[in-house]
Image (cartoon, grey):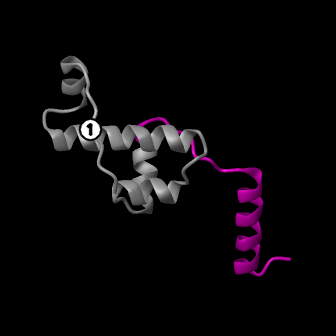
Amino acid sequence: MVEITIKLPDMLAHAFGATPEARSQRLTEDAAVVEYRAGRLSQRQVGEMLGLDYWQTERFLAERNVPLNYSLGDLQADRATLDEVLGRP
């Protein structure tokens, strides 16, 4: 992990959290959301960044009103897998 130091106005720093750890967590979460929305991070990568499992990551994104990056190709692949598992042609 890379450590960086930034200068923020006091009001903004306090809005991000009361402690340096809380501010770091908030900024990391915000960056993860921005990068996920832009398609530069996958859901798995967001979870890894934040130390969350699959379901915690789903909840984290949902609580922030972030739509899942789920393409038509993803849907077709999931349907094909489901058909295979259920023995459907």
Question: Along the line of sight, which residue is nearer the eye, 74 or 50?
Answer: 50
Q: Residue at x 18, y 20 (%)?
A: 10
Q: Please tell me whether residue 78 is drawn above or below residue 12 in the rendered image.
A: below
Q: Which residues are magenta?
A: 62-89
In the rendered image, residue 12 lying in the magenta stretch gets the answer no
Looking at the rendering, which quadrant does residue 85 occupy? Answer: bottom right
Residue 35: percent from left, percent from top: 52, 42
Q: Please tell me whether residue 79 is drawn above or below residue 43 in the rendered image.
A: below
Q: Residue at x 18, y 44 (%)?
A: 21
Q: On the image, numbered disc 1 is attached to which residue?
A: 5
In the rendered image, residue 70 lying in the magenta stretch gets the answer yes
Quadrant including the C terminus: bottom right
Q: Residue at x 34, y 59 (%)?
A: 51
Look at the magenta stretch and give its main secondary structure: helix
Q: Is residue 27 left or right of residue 36?
A: left
Q: Secondary structure at mark 1?
A: loop
Residue 47: percent from left, percent from top: 42, 57
Q: Residues within 10 Å of mark 1 (few under 14, many from 20)?
A: few
Residue 80: percent from left, percent from top: 77, 70
Q: Please tell me whether residue 73 is drawn above or below residue 17 in the rendered image.
A: below
